[in-house]
Image (cartoon, rainbow, N blue to C red):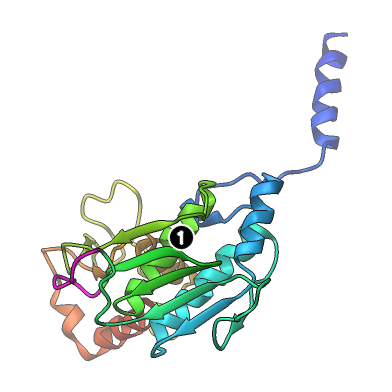
Amino acid sequence: MLLRSFLLPLAFVAASPRSKAADGYMLWQKYDLITDVAQRNAYRQAAQYIAVEGSTSAVLRTAVSELQRGLQGLLDQPVPLVAQPQASSTNRGISLIVSPTANVAGITITQTTDGYRISSQGRDVVLTGRSGAGVLYGVYALLRHLQTGQSLANLTQASNPRIQYRLLNHWDNPNGTVERGYAGSSIWKWYELPERLDPRYTDYARANASIGINRLAINNVNASARYLTPEYLQKVKALAGVFRP
């Protein structure tokens, strides 16, 4: 009898639909669907298109891609990229503007080019950055704003980093070990580079950019001279190619 009472709930669990639990890999960039229907519909009305003004660059294209990716997940609908803001009484959208001389934080920015301002202007949301990188950081800020369920009405948000180089320092070795490696082995798979680029490198770069990290040291202070050999310089170059955009 005791065995039957144990097997019954066990079979019940086995028969239940499997659900995919979040494992934390995507950090805050999961972009789960906004469950508040009214809030989601309000955001959908405000994000019917994305327009880009100013010079295009690889970083700006990344910003557009990240915004589309985030909106797709949060709103469960694609948001198209258009050539220019749509002058219409019904269409509302998000404009991304690159302006090197923009006064985006209430003062003239002299410390860095990574500053941005997000504001509601008429029916649209306008995100202005001093550079493509500034726009990218602003995109992440806007997505966080939506994820936390905040209103887009009368939106005014600005950031101007005081530190130009915001560095994450690794303590990794060419042999795959990590000095003080309490969290495991190195993320860098040197034996695969430059031929294969692990998808985790892109995910890692996205996570860093989302919190404003813009520099990376791949090795520790006890650096091996192997990094300076022609073989390893090609490997480092391949990694840099992933991180730059």
Direction from residue 67 to residue 208 in the image, left or right: left
Residue 242 appears at what percent x and percent y?
Answer: 39, 79
Q: Residue at x 69, y 47 (%)?
A: 38
Nearest to the observer: residue 156 or residue 173: 156
Please identify the quadrant where the C terminus is shown.
Answer: bottom left
Q: Is residue 201 left or right of residue 16?
A: left
Q: Which residues are magenta?
A: 106-113
Q: Is residue 22 above or below residue 120?
A: above
Whether residue 111 sits left or right of residue 120 in the image: it is left
**Element on which disc 1 rests:** helix
Image coordinates of residue 97 in percent, x first then y, are 41, 79
Residue that mark 1 sits on: 142
Reply yes or no: does residue 107 show up in magenta. yes
Residue ID at (69%, 55%)? 41
15 versus 106 height, above or below: above
Q: Residues within 10 Å of mark 1 (few under 14, many from 20)?
A: many
Q: Nearer the viewer, residue 216 or 49?
A: 49
Q: Residue at x 39, y 61 (%)?
A: 210
- Residue type pointed to by label 1: Leu
- What is the residue that sits farthest to the top in this orientation? 1
Based on the picture, tell me whether residue 171 belongs to the magenta stretch. Answer: no
x and y, in percent, of residue 205 in the image: 39, 68
x and y percentages locating residue 53 in the rendered image: 44, 85
Residue 131's quadrant in the figure?
A: bottom left
Q: Residue at coordinates 56% horizontally, 89% vertically from top-left?
A: 83
Residue 183 visible in the current orientation? yes
Task: Decide if residue 232 is on the left or right side of residue 199.
Answer: left
Among the 4 quarters of the image, the one containing residue 192: bottom left
Q: Main secondary structure of the magenta part?
A: loop
